[in-house]
Amino acid sequence: MHLKTTSTILGLAVGSALTLSAMPAKAATVEFGNNGILFDTDTQIDFDFIRSQGAFKSTLFIVEAANPTDPVFTLFKENEPFDDTSPDFIGTCPTSVTVPGSSSCTNLFTFEAGIEYSLALFSGNNNPAGTNGFVYSTDALNTPANRQAFVFDGVVLPPYTEPGEGSSDPALGKVTIAFDDKGGGNDGDFQDFIITAMETKESIPEPATLAALGLVAGSLTLIRRRQR
């Protein structure tokens, strides 16, 4: 009788855990775009480098909006300004651009809940004179405040004549971010550094999954006590 009861409890617990763990991760995006990057739960994002185009040697950082000139993470770095054989200053990975210290074209970062972040492209003292070399995906952080990043859904690059959408959701699919580095007199071409971003749903356990696993552990403890 005890064995039947405890087996039923264990079955229910394991079934609940499997069901909850199979549930898709809930989108946690509060903002991802030109108004900032903010999540309401810790969220891991997969960034892929697409291409750069320009004579500047640039590095793409993640910064906290409260301290935008102090990077917290380096996503991609141009080891050379462009590929040696490029006819138009185009940089590719891994020829001239990589994740620092590796030959990878993909990098991961976990954004902490409740902290506002931005992507920051550093290209030295670009034109116009007097800038600090940083341009941001967050409009308000740029000097003067304007749009230096083109944020939109999908991976097909649109014409660069418009500043693009203001925000997208990496939980729903790939988001493309294309920067204008202010070089060439701030030409607004939005092709100087291009990446994609997508949420990695399986990377961080959901609270419901953790609770279900705790239920399984509790059930196993109950079984051992009954067996004694």
Image (spheres, rainbow, N blue to C red):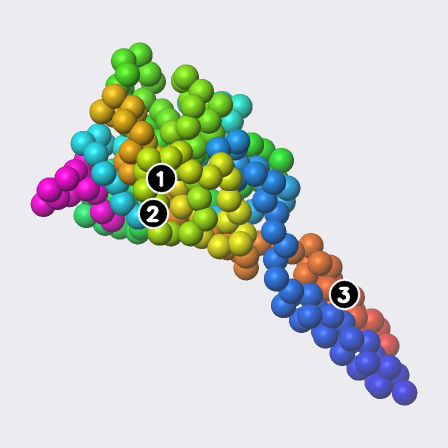
In the picture, which quadrant includes the N terminus?
Answer: bottom right
**Hey, which residue is sitting farthest right in the picture?**
1
**What percent of the width, then of the height, locates residue 12?**
78, 75
* Image quadrant where residue 97 sits: top left
The residue pinned by badge 2 equals: 157
Give the amino acid at mark 3. Answer: Leu
Dominant secondary structure, magenta: loop
Give the secondary structure at mark 3: helix
Between the residue at mark 2 and the residue at mark 3, the CA separation in whole angstroms equals 47 Å
Q: Is there a contact, CB below 8 Å, between mark 1 and mark 2?
A: yes
Q: Residue at x 32, y 38 (%)?
A: 160
**What percent of the width, then of the height, locates residue 125?**
27, 19
Can residue 79 be seen here? no
* Image quadrant where residue 192 sits: top left
**Hey, which residue is sitting farthest top in the picture?**
130
Q: Residue at x 36, y 39 (%)?
A: 178
